[in-house]
Amino acid sequence: MFLHGFGSSPRELKPLGQRLYRSGFHVVAPLLPGHGERSVGMNSCGLEDWEEAVRLTFESLHQDGSPVAVVGFCLGGVLALTTARELNPRALVCLSTPISHLEDSLFPVCDKDLRSTECLQQDCQSGEARRWRRRGCHPLVTGRFLETYQEAIVKGAERATEIRCPTLVVGGGKSKVVRPEDAESLHHLLPMEIEKSLHLASQSGHAVPVDHGRREVYRLIDDFLLEIDSTDDSRF
């Protein structure tokens, strides 16, 4: 199960999804509530709505007992952390996942309650990745929507210590939004007794699924999930 980033859509995870699909994995990527909507839709949803969307998608995949891994980018990684204790996935992959409040200055006020997401669109080393992000991201989000994201980040950091499944943490080595230290701190927060690993994509900004070094990230995720899958009787 793929979970997309804040203010974006499943489109940003399509290349990674295609790679895993070719390896034999079943890939599902829901659109999180408030995304793809106008201001009213953004303001009408809260953290519980995001978590419920994750829960319903997970349960639909797991209803026949099949193991489910969760791959989350940005907000998606945060939600993977906040729901993992309840859902108990087979594995987690957290891409550019913050565990501390993002600086408000990253999201300047543009008009009344609207905040710019330019930082999320432009924090890429690759021009192609920036163009890809610009086509798929909300240019503006409401202040309430951003507050909900910040609330989720706090909860995700609290829940990280409760993870009980193998977890791969990937950070962008040149990101100005979710800095490499966040990936290192998240890796440190995870319990010592679980299988966990950390990778910093040294040439990537925030958008590790589409930025420089993405093919190496794809390979790492593919190998990580295939190794775990080899110990199960059925596919993810």
Image (cartoon, helix red, strand yellow):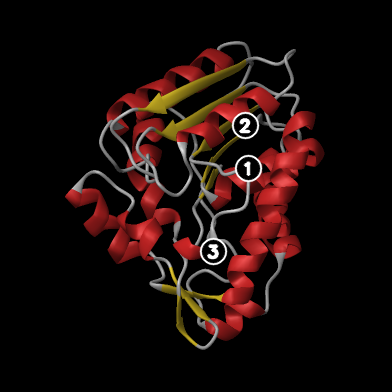
Q: Amino acid at mark 3?
A: Asp
Left or right of 229 in this view: 13:
left
| Location of mark 1 (residue) | 99
Instruction: Tell which tag, 2 or 3, sits nearer the viewer.
Output: 3
Kindly identify the residue that appears in the image at 72 percent across and 15 percent down.
192
Left or right of 147 in this view: 180:
left
Could you say which disc has been placed on residue 55 in the image?
none
Q: Percent position (x, y) of residue 106?
A: 46, 61
Q: CA distance from mark 3 to mark 1?
A: 15 Å
Q: Is residue 236 visible?
A: no
Residue 149 vs 97, above or below: the answer is below
Could you say which disc has been placed on residue 104 in the image?
3
**Quadrant placement of the C terminus:** top right
**Quadrant placement of the N terminus:** top right
Kindly identify the residue that appears in the image at 40 percent across and 40 percent down.
17
Q: Percent position (x, y) of residue 197?
A: 55, 18
Discs 2, 1 touching: Cβ within 8 Å: yes
Q: Mark 3 or 1 closer to N-term?
A: 1
Instruction: Tell which tag, 3 or 1, sits nearer the viewer.
Output: 3
Left or right of 191 in this view: 228:
left
Q: Mark 2 or 3 closer to N-term?
A: 3
Q: CA distance from mark 2 to mark 3?
A: 21 Å
Q: Residues within 10 Å of mark 3 (few under 14, many from 20)?
A: few
> Mark 2 falls on what kind of element?
helix
| Location of mark 2 (residue) | 186
Residue 79 vs 64, above or below: the answer is below
